[in-house]
């Protein structure tokens, strides 16, 4: 029983990164209708930015997080200029191809710039253990769910109570009406990409202290994030948050009680079943988008 | 505008391809030798280490006046760990550059596909890091065209398993491996040998290469209290496992596959890898005097210690060049015969003292693997 | 008429190529032919029928592994394996086509990526059946005997190249007939407006499934040809990067233009051969080309050209 709670805790840690990556992905899709296949690369770049901030610039952890947020936001602005601005009046396949090309380009640019060898962010508190009842977590792991809750809460408040947040939600509901009501569509698009990239970037940075960063690390996390987005319902932020944690816990329990070799397969099987039988997602409403 | 420049470019490309090349190797110019390694893509981590050994061998030979009175030029091709690309690269090296032998490549599957083509051209290949038995097993016994100057992965698994039971005196062994052929083959060999020399396997689990979170798997493993844990897979994953094991409080003797030999592994695993053991073909502190001298020269030139990767690249290249020198002309048929049987007195830098390029009928040199143990952040060979 | 004589001249030139150049150049030309089949096949389902697929590499691999496994277990030659590979890949194409009946655009793209990943996982990890990461090697059962001529080892590359050329001509011709048939026009109708196509009484289910099957079967044929040319298969030759490359070929050349993907295939295979030591930038260049092409020239080189001449 003690171990069961430990497994749940491990799942919450990994699930929190899925949440951070998937919420940005679902936001970009829900508001702008862009399927961003380069989202895993935001995660990867966040990891490298974190390593640069700590090892090259010598920043302490919290300013380093700020640095990663800022760089990722810039990446988001650039990505919007490539993936959304020139594609506004085109069909959905254009942004799919374009973001796929961007993902390929970014991965290989990182390969050339940083080399293929994995890298790791070494922080001062990397070995401080924290015990909560029967659960044991190193501080750097505990940071991940904490940061997730903080960032998602901030996002919730922004979406709920600020003018920008209201414009974002208006856009998600109906573009033309939002535009008629005075929402600046261009600005909303840029903000959406900035937020999405920043969330993924922070996830990448936090994970680079626990795991490793290498140029193709975004592939797997992007697949997981797509799984989460589909489970939660495309464009559904709350759904993505719940589904992310669920996927993390399911994976952890799979490797604890069934076999570790099955953990990556479980998500795929679920997603294909969901796509076949409930394409609107577990928490989504059925909407005909044609 | 765009269209015209593109069409223009295409027609130039077409003309270059169609032009038959009648370039003849000149007897006074440099002798070209071929090299083929993964220099881009995931396996370029290893490829870029191995190429240092190739280049170092060529530099040293050229400093001594080259071979047959001519300078040596190393022509490198990137196979991207892709068989289609590897086969094209071999044809290009042999037909365009007229190389008498090729050193390459790292991925065993690519080496197997490429060496079939080079054997048709009757040009010998010397392994550039491929350790899988598949590449030498497809040689015709007695007439190999693919040579590997070190033992295959089955021998590595055998030596590792014996070290766990006999040297470290650990009998309850847990096995973790990735799902690549490399990890699976080694894990099976270790499992078999551990059981046959009196040990027992307490658990066996696998992961996908590149997986990041091992915490739950290792937490479960801790409850089984293994005396030793064998990890078969790539270096990055191995480092992740060792580090996360320390986090969840699993402290035991860790033993890894040969891929975890690099200094990168130590850097990524951090202090958690203290005591980690790994099978090794070469260490700078080798008891082999030829190897030790090579290590000193290499360290002076590159400001870093030679390792398994640079040493095997150096050996494969030196063996090819020595065969070329003894034959006296860049004739690939004669060179194959010379490598096959004529170099039993040629010392190599890998393996224990006195190891020579004595290839067996399948094109492999057999010697026991070292077992290196990490102490104070360095691999050591002392028993 | 002009198109036909141009095509015939091109085929003749390609057939005579081995007399003018060495094995390396023939090898490169053969790789181009493999990709021509792949790109033309993808164009049928994506360019004509508008169903997005990132799974070309998976069908390519299914064809190649069918050839290698049949060769291992049954000792079959390339001539038996060609239809078998097309059949197996086509059946899986049907399987992937079923979700396409319900899903559109991005959903479909994600399913094809999942399919590609699952096929890769199976061929790389079902070691007892597929040889795992190391793959399978095949005996040298080239087309040597069928031509009735004793050809020596290196010369058999020529024979194999000609076989590849013949198969490519057959595949491209079949694809061209399909694209210009009534079925091909149905595909275009589905791409342009599926609701309208269904409203006027077209069987969109049949249309989509046939496009998926045709595309997959062509990729399967390319896979069989590749497996026999390498005399073996390895999973890393059938990754999502292959799919990405073929998508790039199609998009850069021009979707739904038929000739465009062929030009894209020639261009992208030749490019790295001329990049020389800059070849490590290959995938970076593919990525950038893909982004630039879809942004400034979404209709591709050939599409743009046709627009100009139409003006």
Image: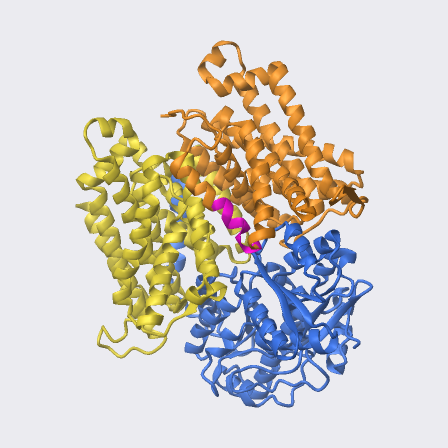
Q: Position of residue A268 (x, y in %)?
A: 48, 45
What residue is at 40 percent from the left and 42 percent from the top?
C252
Q: Is residue B109 left or right of residue A17?
A: left
Q: Quadrant of the C terminus of chain B?
A: bottom right
Colour-to-chain, yellow: C
Q: Is residue C26 left or right of residue B153?
A: left
Q: Assess whether residue A261 is covered by the magenta stretch.
A: yes
Q: Quadrant of the N terminus of chain B?
A: top left
In the image, which residues are magenta? A260-268
Q: Is residue A30 above or below residue C300?
A: above
What colour denotes chain B? Answer: blue
The percent position of residue B42, horizontal first and vertical second, equals: 57, 56
Q: To which quarter of the image does residue A276 belong?
A: top left
Question: Which of these two is toward me, A177 or A211?
Answer: A211
Residue A285 point in image, percent of width and height: 44, 25
Rendered image quadrant of residue B271 = bottom right
As drawn, which residue projects farthest toward the top? A181
Residue occupying image coordinates x 29% and y 64%: C81
Q: Is residue B220 above or below residue A23?
A: below
**Residue A202 in sight in this render:** yes
Question: Residue B21 sits in which quadrant?
Answer: bottom left
């Amino acid at each position: 029983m003690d171990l069961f709670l430990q497994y749940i805790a491990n799942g919450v840690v990994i699930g929190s990164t899925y949440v951070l990556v998937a919420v940005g992905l679902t936001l970009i899709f829900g508001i702008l209708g862009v399927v961003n296949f380069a989202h895993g690369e935001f995660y990867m770049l966040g990891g490298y930015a974190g390593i640069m901030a700590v090892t090259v610039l010598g920043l302490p952890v919290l300013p380093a997080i700020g640095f990663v947020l800022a760089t990722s936001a810039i990446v988001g602005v650039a990505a919007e200029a490539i993936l959304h601005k020139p594609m506004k009046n085109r069909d959905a396949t254009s942004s799919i191809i374009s973001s796929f090309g961007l993902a390929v380009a970014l991965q290989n640019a990182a390969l050339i710039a940083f080399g293929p060898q994995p890298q790791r962010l070494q922080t001062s508190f990397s070995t401080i253990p924290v015990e909560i009842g029967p659960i044991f977590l190193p501080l750097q792991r505990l940071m991940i769910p904490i940061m997730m809750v903080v960032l998602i809460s901030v996002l919730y408040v922004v979406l709920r109570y600020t003018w920008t947040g209201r414009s974002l939600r208006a856009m998600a509901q109906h573009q033309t009406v939002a535009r008629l009501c005075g929402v600046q569509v261009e600005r909303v698009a840029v903000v959406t990409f900035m937020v999405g990239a920043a969330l993924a970037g922070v996830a990448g940075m936090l994970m680079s202290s626990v795991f490793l960063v290498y140029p193709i690390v975004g592939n797997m996390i992007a697949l997981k994030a797509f799984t989460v987005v589909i489970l939660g319902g495309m464009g559904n932020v709350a759904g993505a948050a719940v589904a992310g944690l669920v996927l993390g816990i399911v994976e952890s329990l799979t490797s604890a009680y069934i076999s570790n070799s099955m953990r990556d397969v479980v998500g795929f099987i679920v997603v294909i079943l969901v796509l076949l039988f409930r394409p609107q997602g577990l928490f989504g409403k059925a909407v005909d988008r044609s | 505008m765009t269209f015209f420049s593109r069409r223009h470019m295409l027609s130039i490309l077409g003309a270059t391809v169609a032009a038959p090349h009648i370039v003849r190797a000149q007897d006074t110019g440099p002798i070209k030798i071929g090299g083929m390694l993964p220099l881009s893509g995931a396996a370029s981590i290893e490829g870029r280490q191995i190429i240092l050994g190739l280049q170092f061998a060529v530099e040293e030979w050229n400093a001594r006046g080259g071979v047959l009175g001519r300078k040596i030029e190393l022509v490198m091709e990137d196979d991207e760990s892709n068989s289609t690309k590897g086969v094209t690269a071999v044809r290009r090296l042999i037909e365009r550059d007229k190389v008498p032998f090729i050193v390459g490549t790292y991925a065993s599957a690519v080496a197997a596909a490429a060496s079939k083509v080079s054997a048709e051209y009757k040009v010998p290949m010397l392994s550039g890091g491929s350790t899988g038995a598949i590449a030498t097993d497809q040689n015709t016994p007695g007439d190999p065209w693919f040579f590997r100057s070190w033992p295959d992965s089955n021998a590595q698994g055998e030596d590792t398993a014996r070290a766990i039971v006999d040297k470290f005196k650990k009998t309850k062994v847990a096995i973790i491996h990735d799902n690549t052929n490399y990890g699976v083959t080694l894990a099976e060999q270790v499992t078999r040998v551990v059981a046959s020399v009196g040990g027992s396997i307490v658990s066996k689990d696998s992961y996908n290469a590149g997986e990041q979170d091992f915490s739950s798997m290792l937490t479960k493993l801790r409850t089984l209290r293994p005396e030793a844990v064998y990890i078969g897979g790539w270096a990055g994953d191995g480092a992740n496992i060792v580090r996360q094991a320390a986090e969840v409080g699993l402290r035991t003797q860790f033993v890894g596959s040969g891929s975890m030999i690099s200094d990168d592994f130590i850097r990524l695993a951090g202090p958690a890898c203290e005591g980690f053991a790994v099978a090794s073909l070469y260490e700078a502190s080798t008891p082999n005097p030829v190897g030790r001298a090579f290590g000193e020269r290499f360290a002076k030139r590159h400001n870093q210690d030679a390792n398994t990767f640079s040493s095997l690249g150096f050996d494969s290249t030196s063996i090819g060049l020595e065969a070329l020198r003894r034959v006296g002309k860049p004739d690939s048929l004669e060179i194959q015969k010379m490598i096959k049987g004529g170099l039993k007195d040629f010392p190599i830098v890998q393996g224990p003292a006195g190891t020579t390029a004595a290839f067996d009928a399948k094109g492999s040199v057999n010697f026991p693997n070292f077992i290196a143990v990490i102490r104070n952040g360095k691999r050591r060979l002392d028993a | 008429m002009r198109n036909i004589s141009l095509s015939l001249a091109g085929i003749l030139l390609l057939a005579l190529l081995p007399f003018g150049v060495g094995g390396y150049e023939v090898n490169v030309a053969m790789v181009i032919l493999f990709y021509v089949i792949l790109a033309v096949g993808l164009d049928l389902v994506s360019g004509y029928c508008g169903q997005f697929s990132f799974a070309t590499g998976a069908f390519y691999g299914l064809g190649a592994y069918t050839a290698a496994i049949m060769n291992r277990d049954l000792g079959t030659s390339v001539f038996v394996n060609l239809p078998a590979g097309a059949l197996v890949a086509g059946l899986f194409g049907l399987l992937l086509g079923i979700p396409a009946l319900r899903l559109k655009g991005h959903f479909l793209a994600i399913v094809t990526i999942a399919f590609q990943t699952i096929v890769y996982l199976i061929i790389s990890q079902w070691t007892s059946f597929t040889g795992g990461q190391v793959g399978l090697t095949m005996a040298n059962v080239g087309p040597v005997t069928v031509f009735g001529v004793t050809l020596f080892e290196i010369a058999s590359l020529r024979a194999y190249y000609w076989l590849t050329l013949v198969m490519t001509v057959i595949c491209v011709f079949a694809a061209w007939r399909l694209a210009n048939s009534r079925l091909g026009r149905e595909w275009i109708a589905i791409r342009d407006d599926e609701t309208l196509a269904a409203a006027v009484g077209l069987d969109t289910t049949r249309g989509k499934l046939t496009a998926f099957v045709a595309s997959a079967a062509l990729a399967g044929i390319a896979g069989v040809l590749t497996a026999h040319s390498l005399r073996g298969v390895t999973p890393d030759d059938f990754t999502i990067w292959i799919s990405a490359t073929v998508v790039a070929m199609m998009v850069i050349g021009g979707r739904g233009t038929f000739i465009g993907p062929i030009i894209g295939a020639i261009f992208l295979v030749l490019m790295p051969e001329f990049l020389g030591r800059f070849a490590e930038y290959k995938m970076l260049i593919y990525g950038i080309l893909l982004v630039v092409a879809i942004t400034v020239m979404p209709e591709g080189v050939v599409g743009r050209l046709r627009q100009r001449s139409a003006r």
